[in-house]
Image (cartoon, rainbow, N blue to C red):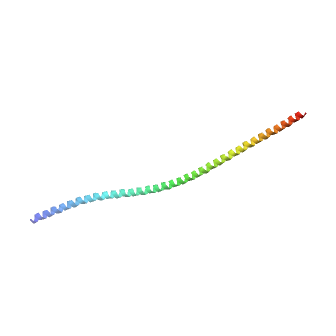
Amino acid sequence: SERLQKQIELGVVQADRDNLLSQLIELEKDSMELKQVKMYQKKLEENNERLSRERDSALVQAAQMKKQCDIMQADYQKTRAMVQELTADLNSRSKGTEALVLQRFCSEVSAKFEIEKANHMKTQSE
């Protein structure tokens, strides 16, 4: 009976040992999975940091480009205003030139008319 008792205890101990071994194997698998999860988590954190830096850099570049666009828009408006001003000035000058040419022509015609009139009067008086 004592021998039977020892065999039963030995069987229980072996069953416990087998059970503990299978639990140890499961724990090792879980440990490996946990290591992989931590590795993936670290990679994700690194990617998030990199993406965050790239986003910040892109935002800075976008702000600089907006600033340049605003400057270019202001320069365009200034240039457009200057072109309009120069066009108006040119138009007024050309009108002034036309007026001078017309005035000279009228003066010449008037002078010729006076000469012709004087010649005609001279011819009639003779």
Foreground residue, 103 or 14? 103
Q: Is residue 12 left or right of residue 37?
A: left
Residue at horizontal 26%, vertical 58%? 26
Residue at image point 41% right, 56% down: 48
Q: Position of residue 19 (x, y in %)?
A: 21, 60
Q: How many marks?
A: 0
Residue 23 sits in quarter: bottom left
Q: Nearer the viewer, residue 64 or 42?
A: 64
Q: In which quadrant is the N terminus drawn? A: bottom left
Nearest the viewer among 125 and 24 is 125
Left or right position of 124 against 17: right
Query: Does residue 91 sit above or below 23 in this rendering?
Result: above
Is residue 93 shown left or right of residue 41? right
Q: Residue at x 27, y 59 (%)?
A: 27
Where does the C terminus fall, quadrant-wise? top right
Q: Residue 36, how many percent across, how many down? A: 33, 56
Identity of the residue furthest to the bottom in this view: 2
Where residue 57 sits: x, y (%)? Answer: 48, 55
> Looking at the picture, does residue 2 appear above or below residue 117?
below
The residue sitting at 32% across, 58% down in the picture is: 34
Q: Residue 15 location, x and y as percent?
A: 18, 60
Residue 91 lies in quadrant: top right
Residue furthest toward the right?
Answer: 126
Furthest toward the left, the residue is 1
